[in-house]
Amino acid sequence: MIADQCVYVCRDPVSGLPTIIAVHIDDMTLCTRTDTELSQLKGELASKFQVMDVGELTQILGMQVQQDNSDGSIQLSQVSYISHMLESVGISNCNPIAIPIDPNVKLMPLTDGDPYIGDAKF
């Protein structure tokens, strides 16, 4: 794994399995292999820092997180972000189509006066 200043990885010396702590501003995401490891990690962090446990991860960095413990899958979604972007440009009531753009359309570079969404020019 490439080092990241906000992601900390500790490998179990016997199994080699990772425990991952991701930190973003004042939020932490804890990733462990078992509930026992998670409880132990939470206890260690609480003994050194003032922490608040808000439960299972449901959102991170603007993405919704859905976990299915029966098959171990994790699904990420940006529906809220996309809805916000559509609302910000007044097209939240648009109708979806199977092909998002005519394949024959030639895209051209932006010119002065083209609209912005936040800091991004569109």
Image (tube, rainbow, N blue to C red):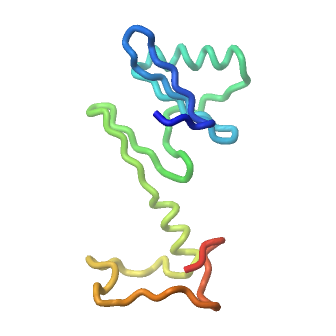
Q: Is 17 in front, or is 42? A: 17
Numbered marks: total: 0
Q: Give the x, y percent position of residue 60.
A: 54, 45
Q: Is 12 in front, or is 52? A: 12
Whether 84 is drawn above or below 59: the answer is: below
Judged left or right of residue 33, residue 30 is: right
Quadrant in the picture for residue 89:
bottom right
Q: Give the x, y percent position of residue 71.
A: 26, 33
Quadrant in the picture for residue 36:
top left
| x 37%, y 12%: residue | 15
Q: Quadrant of the C terminus?
A: bottom right
Quadrant in the picture for residue 114:
bottom right
| x 51%, y 86%: residue | 109
In the orientation shown, which residue stands out farthest toward the top? 14
Q: Is 110 in front, or is 45? A: 110
Whether 12 is drawn above or below 29: the answer is: above
Q: Is 107 in front, or is 42? A: 107
Q: Give the x, y percent position of residue 99.
A: 28, 78
Q: Give the x, y percent position of residue 54.
A: 59, 33
| x 46%, y 88%: residue | 108
In the orientation shown, which residue stands out farthest toward the front? 2
